[in-house]
C-alpha cells in the first residue's frame, strides 16, 4: 500500500523526495517540512495512531477490523481494493457438520463472522501462506484477503463467501483531530480532492 499511498499524497501536494525514500531511515520529512512520515508494518499503524505517536495514518480496513483500535476513519482513500473472504478447496463447502476449522491471519474477523452465523469454529491463527492450510488438511477453509484470486486458484481454492471489502483508509488519532484540527482538516481536504470526492466514515 505504501507506493499507492505516497502517490495519492503526492497528488494532494504532500511529497517525499526520492532520496528520502531510497534511504533506510524509517522517519522522513516531506519536501515542504510540514509533515513527518513514519514507516511501520501495517498491523502497527493503528497502534502508533491510537497512542498518539502519529496523528494520522494510512492502513487497510482489514487491519482496522482486526485491531479494533479506537480511531477516527474520516476518509476512504480508495486504494488497494481487496475482499476479506472465506475460501475453501474447489467443490468443498465452507460449512459442515461439527466444528469448522478456520485458518486465518484475521482471528477476530473470522470469529465474529462465523459467530454471527451461529457456526462453531476453531480458529487456527497463521502468519503467512494461509492458502496451504486446507490443501494440507490443517483446516476446512481460510479467511484471508483476496485481491485477484490468482493465489487461491493456483492452490486449488476458491472464494465461497465474501465477508466484506477492504480499501486503504486515512485514520486519525481522536485527540489530534481536536487539538490539531486545522492541520488535520487541511490534510483531509487535500486528500479528499486527490481521491476525487472521497467518502467520510465514522
Image: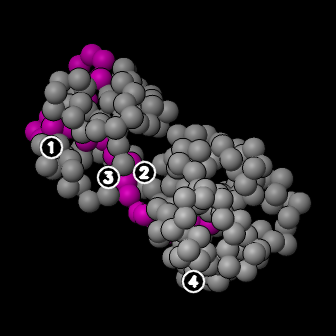
Q: Residues within 10 Å of mark 1 (few under 14, many from 20)?
A: some
Q: Residue at point 34% right, 38% down?
A: 128
Instruction: Tell me if residue 87 is in the magenta stretch.
Output: yes
Most foreground residue, 20 or 173: 20
Of helix, strand and loop, which one carries label 1?
Answer: loop
Mark 3 vs 4, N-terminal side: 4
Instruction: Give x and y (percent) for residue 155.
Output: 15, 43
Of helix, strand and loop, which one carries label 2?
Answer: strand
Image-based side of 9 in relation to 135, left or right = right
Mark 3 vs 1, N-terminal side: 3
List the residue tagged with mark 4. Answer: 11
Q: Residue at point 23% right, 19% down?
A: 97
Q: CA distance from mark 1 to mark 2?
A: 22 Å
Note whether residue 185 is visible.
no
List the residue tagged with mark 3. Answer: 146
Image-based side of 60 in relation to 31, left or right = left
Quarter of the figure with the C terminus: bottom right
Foreground mark, 3 or 1, reads 1
List the residue tagged with mark 1. Answer: 155
List the residue tagged with mark 2. Answer: 164
- Residue range of the region highlighted in magenta in the rendering: 75-101
Instruction: Give x and y (percent) for residue 50.
Output: 72, 46
Task: Name the residue furthest top.
Answer: 98
Above or below residue 54? Residue 89 is above
Mark 1 vs 4, N-terminal side: 4
Toward which corner of the image does residue 13 lie, by quadrant? bottom right
Of helix, strand and loop, which one carries label 3?
Answer: strand
Mark 2 vs 3, N-terminal side: 3
Foreground mark, 2 or 4, reads 4
Foreground mark, 3 or 4, reads 4
Q: CA distance from mark 3 to mark 4?
A: 27 Å
Q: CA distance from mark 2 to mark 3?
A: 11 Å
Amino acid at each position: 500500500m505504501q507506493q499507492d499511498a505516497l502517490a495519492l499524497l503526492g497528488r494532494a501536494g504532500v511529497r517525499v523526495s526520492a532520496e528520502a525514500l531510497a534511504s533506510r531511515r524509517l522517519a522522513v520529512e516531506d519536501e515542504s517540512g510540514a509533515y513527518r512520515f513514519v514507516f511501520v508494518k501495517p498491523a502497527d499503524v493503528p497502534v502508533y495512531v491510537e497512542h498518539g505517536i502519529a496523528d494520522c495514518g494510512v492502513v487497510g480496513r482489514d487491519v482496522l477490523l482486526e485491531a479494533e483500535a479506537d480511531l477516527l476513519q474520516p476518509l476512504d482513500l480508495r486504494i488497494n481494493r481487496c475482499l476479506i473472504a472465506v475460501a475453501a478447496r474447489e467443490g468443498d463447502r465452507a460449512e459442515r457438520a461439527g466444528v469448522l476449522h478456520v485458518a486465518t491471519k484475521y482471528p477476530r474477523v473470522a470469529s465474529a463472522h462465523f459467530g454471527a452465523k451461529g457456526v462453531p469454529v476453531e480458529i487456527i491463527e497463521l502468519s503467512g501462506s494461509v492458502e496451504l492450510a486446507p490443501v494440507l488438511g490443517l483446516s476446512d477453509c481460510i479467511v484471508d484477503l483476496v485481491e485477484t484470486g490468482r493465489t487461491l486458484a493456483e492452490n486449488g481454492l476458491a472464494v465461497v463467501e465474501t465477508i466484506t471489502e477492504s480499501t486503504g483508509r486515512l485514520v486519525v488519532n481522536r485527540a489530534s483531530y481536536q487539538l490539531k484540527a486545522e492541520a488535520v482538516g487541511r490534510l483531509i481536504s487535500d486528500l479528499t480532492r486527490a481521491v476525487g470526492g472521497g467518502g467520510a466514515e465514522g
